Amino acid sequence: MQKSDFYRGTIHSLASSTIMNLTLKIWRQRNRDDAGKFATYQISNVSPDMSFLEMLDVLNVDLIKKGDEPVAFDHDCREGICGSCGLMVDGRAHGPGRGVATCQVHMRSFRDGDVVVIEPWRAGPFPVIKDLIVDRTSFDRIMQAGGYVSVKTGGAPDGNAIPISKHVSDEAFDAAACIGCGACVAACPNSSAMLFVAAKISHLALLPQGGPERKARALRMVEQMDKEGFGNCSNNYACEAECPKEISVAHIARLNREFLKAKLT
């Protein structure tokens, strides 16, 4: 046996050992009026270096080649910034791992032969549009109710001219990191949007630019959240655990304070 043949065989064996075959159980639903059901697919030659969405891309290419309809799923940046990629993977919002969106999950988090269950967000205010895509415009309406400032802040140098302590600016920045993906809602047994609303209110309440609308903002955004049909917070911390930006539930405490102050005054 030639040495080159031995090396080629070794490399082939190593490569083969890293390729996975998976069974995917994916929720398929034609539209919001369809009852929907799970469909089972076999996918092979999955590299552990693939992202979760790349794996779904491979599945869709196979389905299209067979003349079947591809699985509809939402995505944009694929860098954990936009929040549109949110999926329930094996019962967890965004899938395995902590502090990552679905697009940042890699297939090395799974094992060869695994059965992977993929669903859309399960919440009344997030109706399914198709397959794994849900309508999250309820978040947009909450933001329209009060997630804005009327102050003309000017450019970045003008904003930086206002002295703000490091502690406050850091806390405001942590709240502003919310990408509105909806994982907090999907993870909560009550489908509560408190962490999302708290992050948006907390971010602006901490900064002087958010002062003029401070009271009205808390009242209007909470009122709109209730109109949309989101549930109440029961402090089980599932929202914080599954948030891809690891936003603290401490912001919910600030939301409650802001709301009570606005109500009393």
Image (tube, rainbow, N blue to C red):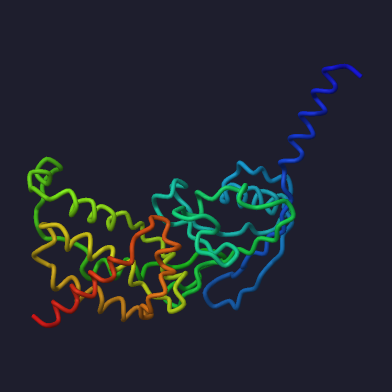
Taking the image as shown, residue 35 lies to the left or right of residue 238, namely right
Q: Residue at x 55, y 57 (%)?
A: 96
Give the image location of residue 228, x and y in percent: 35, 78
| Residue 206 location (% of width, % of height) | 17, 60
Q: Quadrant of the N terminus?
A: top right
The residue located at (56%, 50%) in the rendering is 53
Q: How many marks?
A: 0
Quadrant of the rendering where the C terminus is positioned: bottom left
Vertical side of 4 occupied by 101: above or below: below
In this rendering, is residue 30 above or below 45? below
Image spot of residue 97 (x, y percent) = 52, 55
Q: Nearer the viewer, residue 183 or 137?
A: 183
In the image shown, does 40 or 28 lie closer to the viewer?
40
Q: Residue furthest right?
A: 1
In screen coordinates, is 142 left or right of 130?
left
- Rendered residue at 53%/67% (across/down): 120
Horizontal and vertical percent position of residue 19? 72, 43
